[in-house]
């Protein structure tokens, strides 16, 4: 499901606190699993189309916050266990 449709659905939720966050997390998961390209690119594209002056429900604002985090966070690089300078062990 697309970003705008999930946001629209979350706007109908009047819950606050933990219930709003749970709804936002589920919306984020649905959005992330439906991506057909990189998450950062999709997040940037979704946020570009967002009307910043529009008010949203707590759940929708939390969802937008999750997507904004993806858009502004660099992807983690896998490191070898023991740090970047870890040597390979020789087994006999």
Image (tube, rainbow, N blue to C red):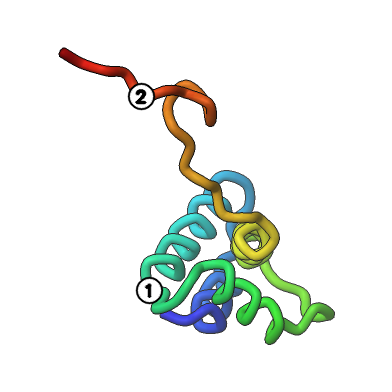
In-image side of 72 versus 86 (left or right): right
Crowding at dot 1, Cα within 10 Å, few <14 / some 14-19 / many 20+, comes out as: few
Query: In this picture, is 55 found above or below 24?
Result: below
Crowding at dot 2, Cα within 10 Å, few <14 / some 14-19 / many 20+, comes out as: few
Give me the residue at 55% from left, 70% from top: 10
Give me the residue at 76% from left, 84% from top: 51
Give me the residue at 62% from left, 46% from top: 17
Give me the residue at 56% from left, 54% from top: 75
Instruction: Report the residue marked by disc 1.
Output: 34
Question: Disc count in the image?
Answer: 2
Query: In this picture, is 13 found above or below 81?
Result: below
Q: Residue reaching furthest right?
A: 53
Q: Secondary structure at mark 2?
A: loop
Q: Secondary structure at mark 1?
A: loop
Please identify the quarter of the rendering in which residue 45 is found: bottom right
* Marked residue nearer the N-terminal end (2 or 1): 1
Q: Nearer the viewer, residue 24 or 15?
A: 24
Residue 53 image offset from top left, x and y in percent: 84, 80
Distance from the alpha carbon under mark 2 to that under mark 1: 38 Å
Q: Nearer the viewer, residue 88 or 64?
A: 88
Please identify the quarter of the rendering in which residue 87 is found: top left
In-image side of 73 versus 55 (left or right): left
Which mark lies nearer to you, 2 or 1? 2
Q: Which mark is residue 92?
A: none
The N terminus appears in which quarter of the rendering?
bottom left
The C terminus appears in which quarter of the rendering?
top left
Instruction: Report the residue marked by disc 2.
Output: 88
Q: Is the C-beta separation of discs 2 and 1 under 8 Å?
A: no
Residue 27 image offset from top left, x and y in percent: 47, 65
Q: Nearer the viewer, residue 66 or 57?
A: 66
Q: Nearer the viewer, residue 67 or 88?
A: 88
Q: Residue reaching furthest top?
A: 92
């Amino acid at each position: 499901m697309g970003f705008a449709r999930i946001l629209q659905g979350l706007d109908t939720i009047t819950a606050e606190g933990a219930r709003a966050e749970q709804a936002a997390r589920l919306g984020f998961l649905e959005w992330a699993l439906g991506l057909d390209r990189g998450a950062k690119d999709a997040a940037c594209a979704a946020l570009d189309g967002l009307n910043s002056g529009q008010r949203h429900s707590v759940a929708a604002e939390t969802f937008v916050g999750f997507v904004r985090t993806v858009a502004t966070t660099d992807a983690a690089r896998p490191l070898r266990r023991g740090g970047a300078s870890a040597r390979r062990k020789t087994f006999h």
